[in-house]
Image (cartoon, rainbow, N blue to C red):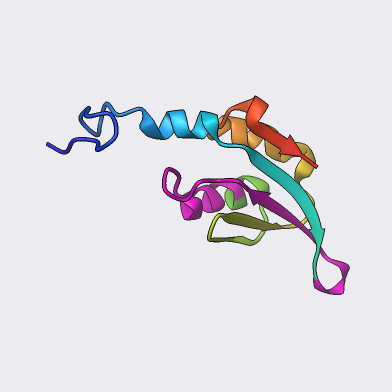
Amino acid sequence: MEVCNKCGLPTDLCVCQELEKDDSRIIVRLEMRRFKKPTTIIEGLESKSTDIIEITKKLKNILACGGSGKGKLVILQGDHRDVLKSHLVDLGFNESSIEVQ
């Protein structure tokens, strides 16, 4: 049986990742890339506690767009700022910690 290093609970009962999701400050912004194409950037996701690639896959499927997860950033093709906050809340992030610019 594996035990969490932070809280000492078994990994199936551990809530450390959920607590880190609540504490993180996520910024959603629009950036114009090459050829004036809009790109939505999500920054502030902690790569230790959350699986950036898994979040990117889920958001790409929900929003039907292309994108990638690089380092601590999620880059999505297109302008999705208006609907992205509700989808991040559905994935378990705290609504008050998400800032849309």
Q: What residue is at 79 percent from the left and 39 percent from the top?
A: 82
Query: Is 15 one of the magenta-colored residues?
Result: no
Relative to 57, 7 lies left or right? left
Quadrant in the picture for residue 33: bottom right
Residue 13 coordinates in the image, percent (x, y): 27, 26
Quadrant in the picture for residue 67: bottom right
Q: What residue is at 53 percent from the left and 53 percent from the top?
A: 57
Q: Residue furthest right?
A: 36
Residue 92 visible in this rendered orientation of the protein: no
Residue 87 coordinates in the image, percent (x, y): 63, 36
Residue 74 coordinates in the image, percent (x, y): 61, 54
Quarter of the picture containing the N terminus is top left
Residue 68 visible in this rendered orientation of the protein: yes
Q: What residue is at 22 percent from the left and 27 percent from the top?
A: 9
Residue 29 coordinates in the image, percent (x, y): 76, 49
Quarter of the picture containing the C terminus is top right
Q: Residue furthest left?
A: 1
Q: Residue furthest bottom?
A: 35
| Vertical comparison of 67 with 12: above or below | below
| Vertical comparison of 62 with 14: above or below | below
Query: Is 58 one of the magenta-colored residues?
Result: yes
Question: Which stretch did the figure color magenta?
Answer: 34-59
| Vertical comparison of 61 with 38: above or below | above
Relative to 46, 8 lies left or right? left
Marker count (numbered): 0
Relative to 20, 13 lies left or right? left
Q: What residue is at 72 percent from the left and 45 percent from the top?
A: 28
- In this view of the protein, which residue sits in the foreground, 40 or 4? 4
- In this view of the protein, which residue sits in the foreground, 15 or 82? 15
